[in-house]
Image (tube, helix red, strand yellow):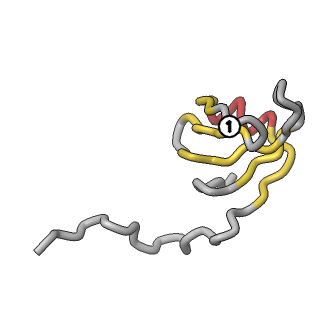
């Protein structure tokens, strides 16, 4: 799955606040997610998050193209 920070994940089950949507803050072996309803942040293992996932809503800004350099990577200050 291609999930990037800024995407919104819609889960199968509701959070106790009633929201199903979570914004992605960090990706890797774990996901850091923020509930869109109450703002609670959680760390979830990738496998568990992908299993509970119903739909990915891409970030409104759009994700950078694959292979494009990351801002600040390899740049030296003059």
Residue 55: percent from the left, percent from the top?
84, 51
Query: On the rendered structure, is 36 left or right of 70?
Result: right
Query: On the rendered structure, is 63 left or right of 20?
Result: left
Q: Could you tell me which residue is drawn at 31 percent across and 66 percent down? A: 72
In the displayed image of the protein, which residue is found farthest to the front?
Answer: 38
Q: Could you tell me which residue is drawn at 71 percent across and 29 percent down? A: 48
In the displayed image of the protein, which residue is found farthest to the left?
Answer: 78
Q: Which of 57 and 53 is in front in this view?
A: 57
Query: On the rendered structure, is 31 left or right of 48?
Result: left
Residue 12: percent from the left, percent from the top?
89, 36
Query: On the rendered structure, is 76 left or right of 65?
Result: left
Q: Could you tell me which residue is drawn at 68 percent across and 37 percent down? A: 39
Q: Could you tell me which residue is drawn at 80 percent across and 41 percent down? A: 53
Residue 46 vertical placement versus 75 (above, below): above
Residue 43 vertical placement versus 9 (above, below): above
Q: Split into 4 quadrants, where in the image is the C terminus?
A: bottom left
Residue 71: percent from the left, percent from the top?
37, 68
Residue designated by label 1: 39
């Amino acid at each position: 799955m291609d999930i990037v920070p800024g995407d919104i994940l819609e889960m199968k089950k509701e959070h106790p606040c009633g929201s199903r949507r979570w914004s992605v803050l960090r990706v890797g072996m774990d996901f850091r997610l923020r509930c869109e309803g109450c703002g609670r942040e959680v760390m979830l293992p990738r496998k568990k998050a992908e299993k509970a996932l119903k739909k990915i809503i891409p970030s409104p800004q759009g994700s950078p193209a694959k292979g494009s350099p990351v801002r600040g990577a390899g740049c030296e200050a003059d």
